[in-house]
Image (cartoon, rainbow, N blue to C red):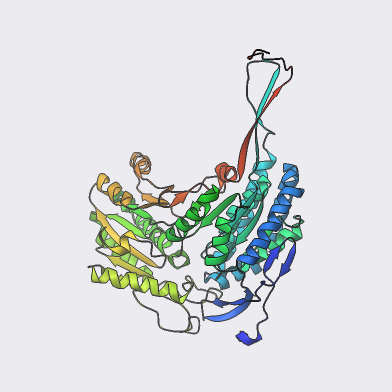
Amino acid sequence: MAESNELQARSTIHAGGEWRAAVSGATREILDPADALPFAVVAEGDEKDTDLAIAAARRAFDEGEWPRTPAAERAALLRRVADLLVRDREELGRLEARDAGKTVEEGRVDIDCVADAFRYFADLVAAESPGRVVDAGSSDIHSVVVHEPIGVCSMITPWNYPLLQASWKIAPALAAGNTFVVKPSEITPMTTIALIELLVEAGLPAGVANIVTGPGHSVGARLSEHPDVDLVSFTGGLISGTKVAQAAAPTVKKVALELGGKNPNVVFADACATDEGFDTAVDQALNAAFIHSGQVCSAGARLIIEESVRDRFVTELARRAEKIRLGRGTEDGVECGPLVSEQQRAKVEMYVESALKEGAVLRSGGKRPEPSPQRPESGYFYEPTVLDHCHREMRVVREEVFGPVLTVETFRTEDEAVALANDTEYGLAGGVWTTDAGRARRVAGRLRHGTIWINDFHPYLPQAEWGGFGKSGVGRELGPAGLAEYRETKHVYQNLAPKPVRWFAG
């Protein structure tokens, strides 16, 4: 690992087809969360860099060829990008693991999902008709509804799934014919930079794809308020998302927000009636809570378990949680990596301490692990933690922890389970475990969450919309609705045989 004074700053701001340093000359070190050592240096942009990137995107949209490029050609470019992602899968997967702290296997899966998203939106626009004909009741009238690109899109993405979340915005925006400026998280920008390089390699015209690396208070704020931006899409926390919406309001931009989640995983006793069913439900509860150290907006951080199986279930859950192998994500055999930053680990520690003071019972974890060769002491590691005897008044139950912390609540009746699951200001995702098909459909229908998994947790489909209820955000990503977010609708009414109306004398 190179020392910070040996690292060379990269020109990581891309505007108008050119890579360059920040106007101010400022830079930022990117740390590997496994050891807190820098492994890259990027440009630290600000409002001036953002204005230049927005101007480039504006010119490319107003004067360039991309918005008027036929859908089949746009689709072909997106497919080329997908092929390049597959080509670079191993390199990008390892870079994502090192940047965000996840395991290499998780990083590889992310790259596969990114390629799938580009292919899906390519196929979607390539198969579309040129417009929807509206019957005007006369052969002399041709009336059609068409979809057009919305314009310049600003995209602000989070640190937990840097490339995946960027692709959910970039792929549909390009498929629709827009130009964009993306701001990745300042602490995990590396794979988004790499994606812009692949877009250039695939032949995307200059100015269509722009990136500004820098902090939210300057770059993100400017992207949200700039009058030449037509849409702002943000994924992140509730507080920041509220600020984005407020900044966008004076210019009446279209706003898409994917915010927090406090997601219930509801387990009925019948799902655990057999040894296989019990084992599967426990295993999936671990998966729901501890993938990527719980740093997932859709994490099943609230286990809501039927009282009759609670003791057995939680005992086995805690036993397995203690066996999860923590370490550097690039090491073989590691199952869970570090948290993304010291700040994030301190936040997790605060929530666990608060829960214990409020009466929660610690069943596993709850502390930093002992250092090892795979787990440097300087890294931001925290043990997978199970907190039993939790209730809805606890902060750890109500607020998004975004770390490897699973809370346990119990219920006796179906109505009580639904009430507990819906008792959250968020409404992003949730899971239901039962062998009763009628109950599964009934409970899924009553839950106020954007995605419901039945007897599973975490899979998503590019073809399905992703969004949430309540304070989990507005708008949709993925699926046809995800493409619609990046379009305007136009009605073209053509009179083939115009005649005087003569409504007025004269």
Figure label count: 0
Q: Residue furthest front?
A: 506
- Between 429 and 44, the residue placed more toward the observer is 44
Tell whether 157 sits left or right of 294: right
**For residue 54, above or below residue 218:** above
Quadrant of the frame with the N terminus? bottom right
**For residue 57, above or below residue 75:** below
Decide if residue 212 is in sight here.
Answer: no
Residue 420 coordinates in the image, percent (x, y): 28, 51
Residue 465 coordinates in the image, percent (x, y): 52, 45
Residue 401 coordinates in the image, percent (x, y): 38, 65
User: In which image quadrant can residue 113 be found?
Assistant: bottom right
Query: What residue lies at 38% left-to-right and 61% top-to-bottom?
Result: 400
User: In which image quadrant can residue 163 be found?
Assistant: bottom right
User: In which image quadrant can residue 127 be found?
Assistant: top right
Decide if residue 168 is in sight here.
Answer: yes
- Between 181 and 450, the residue placed more toward the observer is 181
Quadrant of the frame with the C terminus? top right
- Between 291 and 152, the residue placed more toward the observer is 152
Query: What residue lies at 64% left-to-right and 47% top-to-bottom?
Result: 121
Tell whether 327 sits left or right of 47: left
Query: What residue lies at 45% left-to-right and 56% top-to-bottom?
Result: 242
Tell whether 485 sits left or right of 52: left
Tell whether 32 sits left or right of 311: right
Residue 206 coordinates in the image, percent (x, y): 75, 57
**For residue 472, above or below residue 291:** above
